[in-house]
Amino acid sequence: MGETGKHRAGQATSSTRREVLRFASTVALGGVLPSLAVRPAAATPATMKSAIAAVIGDAKLNAGRVKLEIPPLVENGNTVACAVAVESPMSASDYVKAIHVFNEKNPQPNVISVKLGPRAGRPAIATRIRLSDTQTVTAIAEMSDGSFWSHSVNVVITLGACLEDPL
Amino acid sequence: MARALIKVSPNPKRGEVIEIKTLISHEMETGFRHTNTGTAIPRDIITTFVATYNGEEIFAAQLFPAIAANPFITFYTIAKESGTLEFRWTGDNGYTASEQVKIAVE
Amino acid sequence: MKRAAPVRSGQAFVGAAPRPAAGRVRLFVAATAAITLSSLSLAADIPLNERRSSYEAMSAASKAMQDDDSANPATLWVLDGEALWRAGAGAAGRACADCHGEAPQSMHAVAARYPAYDAKRQTPVDLEGRINICRVEQQQAAALRPESKELLALTAYLARQSRGLPIESNDDRLAPSIEAGRQLFQRRQGQLSLACAHCHDDHWGEKLAGISVPQGHPTGYPLYRLEWQGLGSLQRRLRNCMIGMRAESYAFGSLEFIALETYLMWRARGMPMESPAVRP
């Protein structure tokens, strides 16, 4: 964890990789441009499992009743259309309480958690998410009777050909 | 740029399930990026989005860094009565934004 | 490791703005001699009826994002642009609307014919340049910085007024700039010694790292690029291309970029505007 070479006061402790990146930049605009070049620690399937466990406890996760729609092949992982729809009568006694979406490989396993109720009418949401890499995404619906249902989709992320500097 | 865009049918029929589309400008800085010199860029995201219908909560979402910039959320509700739909976003660094839309239910 | 200086071809004019003007002047003078639009060479151009917007190669989800104003993040900038259009600015406290009225009427089809020739300055001016000329001269306000939120908002708002309309490029006075832009487009540059034309004229439609190579028509600018997660101008995109090719990019607002923009709009003449578009 020691520093090698010069460093500015207040800089984060550098790893060898960051040392290389520090000198790799040629941009005359100064050193404060954001870059995606340093890969942070990523979530793993195990992390996703424990994030799911945090929500469902030790309840059984049933497959079905949930439809997670994500394009199987995505042009850019920065903005991925993601829709979840659940089969439910949405009556006062039988409705979807919540929808949770998880991912496997982003730095963090949670994507969104939504609270619903009978007033929703249709138990469906759509949003746009970020996916860092080809991975599995899982949507879980929590029902008013305490049961949990899920659907998982594998998404392939392609990357653009020409790497670019930010601005 | 504190802009929000709401799209909802302004004159739904009573009891109709209506679609509400919301879009707000926000960079959703994940907290996982670094500058060219290795300094971490701190997280700055919208963390909560709540919709109320004449004061009653009809939708609530907890957002994480995995939500894309300029969060776009579509959801549904039953057009019960005329009134006001209010939307509130809150997030890191004291961020808040709100928007209101009136609907007239037949 | 510093990026190596671009391999220079025989031409004298390269790179960013503060450079000796002689080479650039030489190029423009050579290009000016009795050129009309009809005499521009069409060798190796994409046949007019084979031109395609990169919209067509996008995924259904991205197309849906562009087609629905309430889902297109660029709409947020358009709304901001509308507010700026109406807001008084500068020492004169004058709003764009004070002179130009309602943009849907006064700015109809304007963006579709930019860059346009400025007779007073005897040079083409692009939309961002025109906005700043008005700001400085008519509103006595400071010019807006390239890629600033305000400039992008105003450009998006104006470009939106041309959506669906065909790109127009039929001013003979633009011919020298178009020819200069064509030479830039066909010029090998950078570490890879690649010209824009190599990919976008000769190999469009083929795959590069899993992505279909577009023809590169500026039908949708300023656009929301998923890669940027924000709105950006054509010059920003060109800059990204050049850096991606490992060439030294031109500066924002440079003569080179304006020539390229003018050429690209001529190359896309007749194609419908999509601004503000969405692209991956």
Image (cartoon, rainbow, N blue to C red):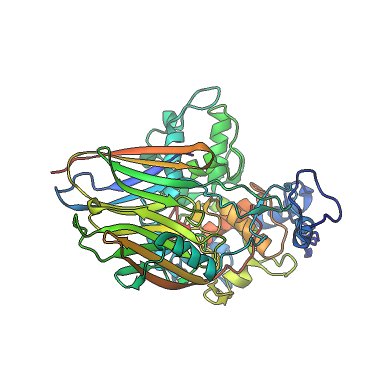
Taking B101 as reference, is B73 above or below it?
Answer: below
- What is the x, y in percent for residue A143? 29, 61
Position of B55 with respect to C164 (left or right) is left
Tell me if I can see residue C137 in this picture: yes
Q: Nearer the viewer, residue A140 or C245?
A: A140
Position of B100 with respect to C255 (left or right) is left
Instruction: Please tell me in which quadrant of the rendered image residue C262 appears.
Output: bottom right
Tell me if I can see residue C165 in this picture: no
- What is the x, y in percent for residue A153? 42, 72
Identity of the residue drawn at 62% across and 69% down: C197
Please identify the residue farthest to the right as the structure is shown. Answer: A5
Instruction: Please tell me in which quadrant of the rendered image residue A90 appears.
Output: bottom left
Q: Nearer the viewer, residue A103 or C248?
A: A103
- What is the x, y in percent for residue C155? 49, 44
Position of C21 with respect to C216 (left or right) is right
Position of C143 with respect to C2 (left or right) is left
Taking C203 as reference, is C266 above or below it?
Answer: above
